[in-house]
Amino acid sequence: MPLSMDCKEFVKRWIAKADATALDNLAGYFDKFTTLFTIYNKLYSEAAFVLNREGAIKLNAKAHIPDAKSATNYIAVFLGEAEMKRLLDHNECSRCDCWNGSHY
């Protein structure tokens, strides 16, 4: 399932921010964590939107995206069991170029 161009651009910008964060003190590590967490929030929200559009899940149009469910269940549905297992088994998560759409 493809990610939107807006999502890909957002992730690319925020990855650049994370990469530029100096890790010379504790604050730098916290800043990098916060930046990476922001990226994950965007990705699981996007996954919920894509799944909703494709009819795999049903979101309430008048409510916020359920964060806990999106961050755990919907992202797993979006990626698929086989892809998650492949990425985790081969430690590719830290090396992949997921935001460019090569996996989706």
Image (cartoon, rainbow, N blue to C red):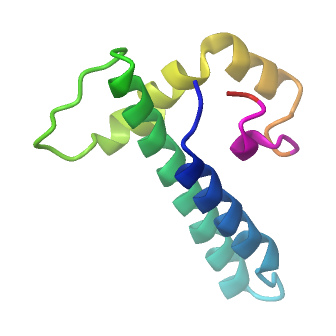
Residue occupying the point 58% across, 57% down? 39
Q: Is residue 66 left or right of residue 102?
A: left
Q: Is residue 23 left or right of residue 54?
A: right
Residue 27 coordinates in the image, percent (x, y) = 66, 86
Task: Determine the image quadrant of residue 89.
Answer: top right
Q: Main secondary structure of the magenta part?
A: loop
Residue 76 coordinates in the image, percent (x, y) = 53, 24
Task: Determine the image quadrant of residue 48.
Answer: top left
Question: Which range of residues does the magenta coloring cover?
Answer: 95-102
88 in the magenta segment: no
Residue occupying the point 48% across, 52% down? 41
**Quadrant location of the C terminus?**
top right
Q: Give the answer, above or below, for where 88 lies relative to 93.
A: above
Q: Give the answer, above or below, for where 74 lies relative to 37.
A: above
Residue occupying the point 51% across, 30% down? 75
Q: Give the answer, above or below, for where 54 lies relative to 94.
A: above
98 in the magenta segment: yes
Residue 64 coordinates in the image, percent (x, y) = 21, 47
Q: Is residue 40 left or right of residue 67?
A: right
Q: Give the answer, above or below, for where 27 lies relative to 75.
A: below
